[in-house]
Image (cartoon, rainbow, N blue to C red):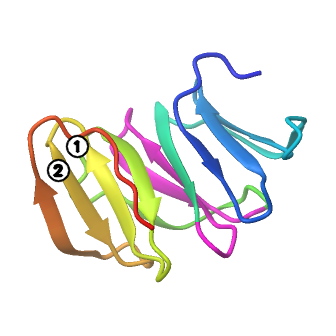
C-alpha cells in the first residue's frame, strides 16, 4: 500500500490509480498491485485517466501535468503553462483537461493537445475539481 496517498482515480475497467511519494501505483479492482507503476514524479497529487486510458498526473513539485500511455510510457503533452502548484485535475468526455492550481487559486483548462483554453476560473481556496 502506498505511503501518504494523495490522488486517486478509477478507469472504466475499475483499475485504481494512486499517487504518493513521487510514484503512481496502479491496482486491480480487487486491490492487488498491477502495472504500470510510474516513478520519478515531482510531488504528484492529482491523477486522472481519460476514456482511452491515457494517464494525467499533476506534479505540484515542478508545476507540470505529465501524461502517460496506459502502459506507463511518458507521452505528450507535458503541460506547464498557467500552473502554480497544480493539485487536482479532471478530464471531461471530450478530452478537455481541467487543473486546479493551489498557489494561484485557479482552475485552468486545456485542450487534449495541452494548449491552454477557456475558461480559467479564479476563486479563493480552490483545491479540487471534478467534471461529469
Q: Which residue is mark 1?
A: 84
Magenta residue span: 50-70
Left or right, residue 126 beside residue 79: left
Residue lying at the far bottom in this picture: please name it. Answer: 94
The residue depicted at 74 percent of the width and 63 percent of the height is 70
**Which is nearer the eye, 80 or 6?**
6
**x and y percent of residue 55 in the render?**
61, 59
What is the number of the mark on residue 106? 2
- Regarding mark 1 in the picture, which secondary structure is present there? loop
- Regarding mark 2 in the picture, which secondary structure is present there? strand
The residue depicted at 56 percent of the width and 37 percent of the height is 41
Residue 21 placement: quadrant? top right
Mark 2 vs mark 1: in front: 2
**Which is nearer the eye, 45 or 72?**
45
The residue depicted at 9 percent of the width and 47 percent of the height is 123
Left or right, residue 123 beside residue 9: left
The residue depicted at 24 percent of the width and 37 percent of the height is 102
**x and y percent of residue 96 in the render?**
40, 75
Callout 2 touching callout 1 (CB < 8 Å): yes
What is the number of the mark on residue 30? none
Residue 117's place in the image compared with 56, above or below, is below
Tell me the quarter of the image containing the N terminus.
top right
Q: How many angstroms separate mark 2 from mark 1 (CA)?
A: 9 Å
Label 1 Cα crowd, 10 Å radius (few <14 / some 14-19 / many 20+)? some
Residue 103's place in the image compared with 117, above or below, is above
Amino acid at each position: 500500500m502506498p505511503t501518504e496517498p494523495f490522488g486517486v482515480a478509477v478507469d472504466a475497467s475499475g483499475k485504481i490509480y494512486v499517487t504518493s511519494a513521487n510514484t503512481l501505483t496502479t491496482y486491480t479492482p480487487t486491490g492487488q498491485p498491477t502495472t504500470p507503476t510510474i516513478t520519478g514524479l515531482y510531488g504528484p497529487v492529482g491523477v486522472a485517466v481519460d476514456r482511452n486510458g491515457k494517464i494525467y498526473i499533476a506534479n505540484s513539485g515542478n508545476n507540470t501535468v505529465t501524461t502517460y500511455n496506459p502502459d506507463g510510457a511518458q507521452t505528450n503533452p507535458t503541460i506547464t503553462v498557467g500552473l502554480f502548484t497544480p493539485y487536482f485535475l479532471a478530464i471531461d468526455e471530450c478530452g478537455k483537461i481541467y487543473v486546479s492550481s493551489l498557489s494561484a487559486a485557479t482552475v485552468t483548462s486545456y485542450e487534449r493537445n495541452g494548449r491552454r483554453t477557456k475558461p480559467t476560473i479564479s476563486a479563493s481556496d480552490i483545491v479540487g475539481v471534478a467534471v461529469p
